[in-house]
Image: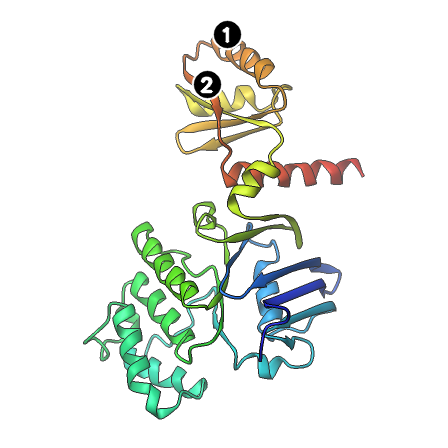
């Protein structure tokens, strides 16, 4: 089934309600074929619910969505033949061997016998498990488990792949290797829809939607989000006693946001000249030396925190 107008995924005014809770609140977006599209947001933002609706695991309350040209409301069984899905929770059977998991998922996806050997060999090589098919899955390191789970999700070579926080709990080196695999799949034409709450991972996506409280707050490429959606200036502060500086600046009126950024503070200011003077005045009066205070390019975390805070402020004033 071909994507609609070159789009692998199309979503229009999608809503999912559980009782009185709107997990998905009237969202619209599309994903192009061969694109890595990311949903970025904290736990509870609605990312996982959206993926489950698109994979045919949940029925939408209202709105429309198509995956591979198929309607998620009426053709969910057919959709599952065209997608791979890797859930947030580790989905393999830990008491089975690596090979047994491959055999099981190959059967679920209806992998043709003539493709079985080639696909199993590919997964084992990709996961770094060649010659280890007899290992019990529970004994694998978490990075190997995640790569094996990815391999099982794409055994049948689906054109669209849904990954729900696939690197949660994975060390940074394994996480980077995992993303190299994702980019390799996208280069071969696979559409990848991925959710994450890791800001640094969002940089790997071609396009992003920032999500909060069931709504899409902003969308675009990582570069567009940093430039188009960040109206204020971000100041980076390096000083002694970070926690004390944070307490001193949290209620500074010239700043709209103060956040810890590693061993630094990021300060968001509508008027940076005014803010620099006020920050220096406050910290000097408290006896805290400033090593560096200067404007920097906003990170995606800066953008997300700022936009989320604006939504909170609008809600309070409504």
Question: According to the image, label 2 marks what residue?
Answer: 293
Q: Position of residue 103 (x, y in %)?
A: 34, 85
Judge whether residue 97 can be spotted in this image: no
Would residue 36 be found to the left or right of residue 171 on screen? right
Judge whether residue 209 can be spotted in this image: yes
Q: Nearer the viewer, residue 181 or 89?
A: 181
Q: Nearer the viewer, residue 236 or 30?
A: 30
Q: Position of residue 74 (x, y in %)?
A: 69, 81
Question: From the viewer's perspective, is the residue at label 2 or at label 1 nearer?
Answer: 2
Please name the residue shown 32% across and 80% down the image.
119
Q: Position of residue 41 (x, y in %)?
A: 56, 50
Question: According to the image, label 1 marks what residue?
Answer: 285
Q: Position of residue 32 (x, y in %)?
A: 56, 63
- Please, which residue is most extreme toward the front here? 5
Looking at the picture, does residue 221 appear above or below residue 265?
below
Q: Residues within 10 Å of mark 1 (few under 14, many from 20)?
A: few
- Please, which residue is most extreme toward the bottom here? 113
Please name the residue shown 39% across and 78% down the image.
155
Based on the displayed image, in which of its 4 quarters is residue 238 positioned? top left
Q: Earlier in the sequence, mark 2 or mark 1?
A: 1
Which quadrant: the C terminus? top right
Would residue 233 be found to the left or right of residue 87 on screen? right
Which quadrant: the N terminus? bottom right
Q: CA distance from mark 2 to mark 1?
A: 16 Å
């Amino acid at each position: 089934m071909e994507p609609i107008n070159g789009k692998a995924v199309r979503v229009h005014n999608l809503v999912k309600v559980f009782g009185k809770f709107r997990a998905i609140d009237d969202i619209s977006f599309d994903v192009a074929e061969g694109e890595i599209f990311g949903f970025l947001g904290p736990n509870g933002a609605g990312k996982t619910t959206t993926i489950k609706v698109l994979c045919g695991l949940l029925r939408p309350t209202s709105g429309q969505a198509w995956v591979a040209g198929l309607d998620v409301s009426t053709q969910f069984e057919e959709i599952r033949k065209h997608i791979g899905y890797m859930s947030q929770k580790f989905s393999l059977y830990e008491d089975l061997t690596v090979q047994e998991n491959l055999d099981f998922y190959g059967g679920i996806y209806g992998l043709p016998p003539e493709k079985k050997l080639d696909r199993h060999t590919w997964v084992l090589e990709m996961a770094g498990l060649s010659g280890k098919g007899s290992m019990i899955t529970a004994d694998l390191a978490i990075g190997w488990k995640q790569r094996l789970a990815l391999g099982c999700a794409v055994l049948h070579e689906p054109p669209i792949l849904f990954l729900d926080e696939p690197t949660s709990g994975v060390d940074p080196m394994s996480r980077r290797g995992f993303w190299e695999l994702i980019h390799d799949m996208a280069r071969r034409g696979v559409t990848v829809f991925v959710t994450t709450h890791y800001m640094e991972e969002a940089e790997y996506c071609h396009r992003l939607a920032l999500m909060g409280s069931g709504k899409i707050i902003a969308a675009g490429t990582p570069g567009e989000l940093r430039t188009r959606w960040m109206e204020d200036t971000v100041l980076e502060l390096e000083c002694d006693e970070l926690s004390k500086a944070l307490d001193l600046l949290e209620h500074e009126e010239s700043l709209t946001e103060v956040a810890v950024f590693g061993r630094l503070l990021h300060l968001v200011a509508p008027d940076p000249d005014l803010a620099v003077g006020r920050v220096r005045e406050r910290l000097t009066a408290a006896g805290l030396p400033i090593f560096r205070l200067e404007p920097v390019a906003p990170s995606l975390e800066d953008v997300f925190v700022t936009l989320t805070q604006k939504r909170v402020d609008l809600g309070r004033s409504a």
